[in-house]
Amino acid sequence: MGALEPWHLVIILFVVMLLFGAKRLPGLARSLGSSVRELKKGFSGDEEPEAKTGPSSPVVQASVAPKPPASETSAPPPTIPPAS
């Protein structure tokens, strides 16, 4: 009597569909999923920013050093005299 059987889940799903309607269920599922993610992040203690970045938060990557302007020339590398 205490076990949750598959037909119980079908009845619960039917009642939820009647209460909220089919159009609002995807939005409710999305918000429930984001709430669960935030809860897990809070328990794990991660302070990393989310993978998604919007246009309001630019990402700066410095992987290559900037080239000097063309007006500045660098000295040629020193030549090593051949051994005698």
Image (cartoon, rainbow, N blue to C red):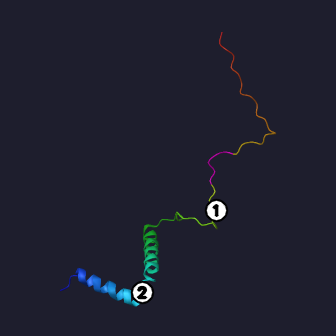
Q: Name which residue lies at 33% across and 86% down.
A: 14
What residue sits right under mark 2 in the picture?
A: 21
Is residue 21 highlighted in magenta?
no
Q: Name which residue lies at 62% across and 59% down.
A: 59
Query: Which residue sits furthest left?
Result: 1
Q: Can you give x and y, in whole percent of width and height, for residue 84 in the image?
A: 66, 9
Q: Can you give x and y, in whole percent of width and height, for residue 53 in the image?
A: 57, 64
Query: Which residue sits furthest front?
Result: 22
Query: Which residue sits furthest right?
Result: 71
What residue sits right under mark 1 in the picture?
A: 58
N-terminal of the pair, mark 2 or mark 1, is 2
49 relative to 25, above or below: above
Q: Name which residue lies at 24% across and 80% down.
A: 6
Magenta region: which residues?
61-65
The residue under label 1 is which amino acid type? Pro
Q: 37 or 82, which lies in front? A: 37
Q: 24 or 29, which lies in front? A: 24
39 relative to 7, above or below: above
Q: Name which residue lies at 74% across and 28% down.
A: 76
Left or right, 78 with reference to 3: right
Q: Can you give x and y, in whole percent of width and height, for residue 55 in the image?
A: 63, 66
Is residue 64 highlighted in magenta?
yes
Q: Main secondary structure of the magenta part?
A: loop
Left or right, 67 with reference to 35: right
- The residue tagged with tag 1: helix, strand or loop? loop
